[in-house]
Every structure is written in structure tokens, then in C-alpha cells.
Amino acid sequence: QVQLVQSGAEVKKPGSSVKVSCKASGGSLSPYTINWVRQAPGQGLEWVGRFIPLLDMANYAHKFQDRVTFVADKSTNTASMELNSLTSEDTATYYCATRSSGNFGAFGIWGQGTKLIVSS
Amino acid sequence: DVQITQSPSSLSASVGDRVSITCQASQDIAKELNWYQQKSGKVPKLLISDAFNLETGVPARFSGSVSGTNFTFTITSLQTEDIATYYCQQYAHLPFTFGPGTTVHL
């Protein structure tokens, strides 16, 4: 089954943007919906949104929808999340996750996480 | 958005104890709720999907049940390796939402 490998840690200044990538290895990205989940330090899991490569369609959680964009490059099997207008509250580990079975809503496969620090 | 109320927020138990965690959804989500385990510093792991379906390789001491909008996750005999934070997550309605988590201590 596919594995998800994410890009490395980032340090960004407030007001800037970050792009986190998630590469599918061992299979094609196309059949998989890529979900993005974040976890602030010491906090719980928060669903950011999802991208469906087959439909080129995204859904976003309300609090992010004005400043997050999901894309996918099918040629490199890589999905990406771009988050704009960063604040210190965006400091978190960002995960990409997808299904391991037919259940599209159960995240059985996770990337290793990308740590983002937003600091001046 | 579907709100998930998860309780307790933390619990302390002994090896061999039966441990139960509940999640209540703010609206009907059928059985579309999953349970995850996250150990300290690790990536979340899917344990149970669709309320009660145990994922392959997950020990049988873990189980899930549902009654209406109330979901229960149970560890029948707690082991030291079960020390973790557990999250429920619904996917019946967008946006998907997670419960706030339950930390299990020894």
C-alpha cells in the first residue's frame, strides 16, 4: 500500500506563507483522498481539509478556507498544502493522511508529520 | 459542524483494568466514527473504523460500540503499551471533526 512522505520542518515569520508537501510512494496518488490534519504543541488533532486528486476538488474546514490551498501534482505523486498569512497560532505539526482501506473517512496511512514554527 | 464531546479528558488506570471512553456527536452520524491512538511523540494510529470495526493487527482487547449518537471505546484489559491519547473522529459530515482526546495514564 502507499506510504506518505512529507517535506521537512519549516520556520516562518508571521504574515508569510508555507508550503508542505506529501509524496505518495509505492503507488499512485490518484486513487487517494489526501487529508491534512494539524496538531498544535500539546493539543489535539484538527482536520484542516482534504484534496481529492481524481476530481481535482478540495474541501476545507471553515477556519482555514480563506488562507489554505491544496494542490496535487500527479506526475510526481505529490500533494501539497499552502497556508498563508501565518500567525504564531499556526505553529503545529502538519500531517497528511489517507485511507488504508475502502473507507475514505478513516485515516489508516499517515505521513511522518511536518513541524512548522511561526516566529518573528 | 458536528461537535464531538469526548469524555473523560483523562483517566488513570492500572494494568488489567477495563477502560472506557465515550464520544457523543451533536447530530446523527450513523456509525461513521473512527478511533485513533496516539502515543507521545508519535503519529496517530487508526484502531477502529465505522464505530466497531477493528483494524487489521489491532489487539482484540480494543473494541467499539455505538448507541444512537453515543460511541464507546473500550480496552478490556489495559496494558502498559496502551498508555496514549485516544481520539474519536467523525466523517459523516464535512468538515470532519475530531474529539478533544482522552489521555490514559497508569
Image (cartoon, coloured by chain):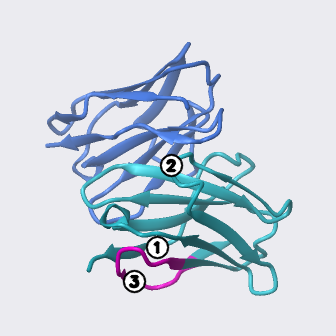
Chain colours: A cyan, B blue
- Disc 3 marks a residue whose amino acid type is Glu
Q: Amino acid at mark 1?
A: Gln
Relative to A41, B24 lies left or right: right
2 vs 3, front mark: 2
Mark 1 = which residue?
A112
Q: Are marks 1 and 3 on the same chain?
A: yes
Q: Are discs 2 and 1 less than 8 Å apart at CB?
A: no
Tags 2 and 1 on a common chain: yes
Chain to which mark 2 belongs: A
Name the residue nearer the viewer: A72 or B83. A72
Residue placed farthest to the right in the image? Answer: A55
Residue holding disc 2: A63
Q: Most extreme residue toward the top, as rendered?
A: B68
A11 within the magenta span: yes
Q: Image quadrant for the C terminus of chain A?
A: bottom left
User: Which residue shows up at 65% across the image and 56% down it?
Assistant: A50
Residue at 33% over, 74% down:
A118
Q: Residue at x 56, y 30 (%)?
A: B51
Span highlighted in magenta in the image = A5-19
Query: Where is A79 relative to A67, above or below?
Result: below
| Amino acid bearing label 2 | Lys
Q: CA distance from mark 1 to mark 3?
A: 14 Å
Write down the residue under mark 3.
A10
User: How far is the residue under mark 2 from the one under mark 1?
Assistant: 24 Å
Point out the tag, 1 or 3, that comes first from the N-terminus.
Answer: 3
Q: How busy is the neighbourhood of tag 3: few (under 14 within 10 Å), some, or many (20 plus)?
A: some
* Residue B57 makes an appearance in the image: no
Q: Compute the Cα span from label 2 to label 3.
A: 22 Å
Looking at the rendered structure, the secondary structure element under dot 3 is strand
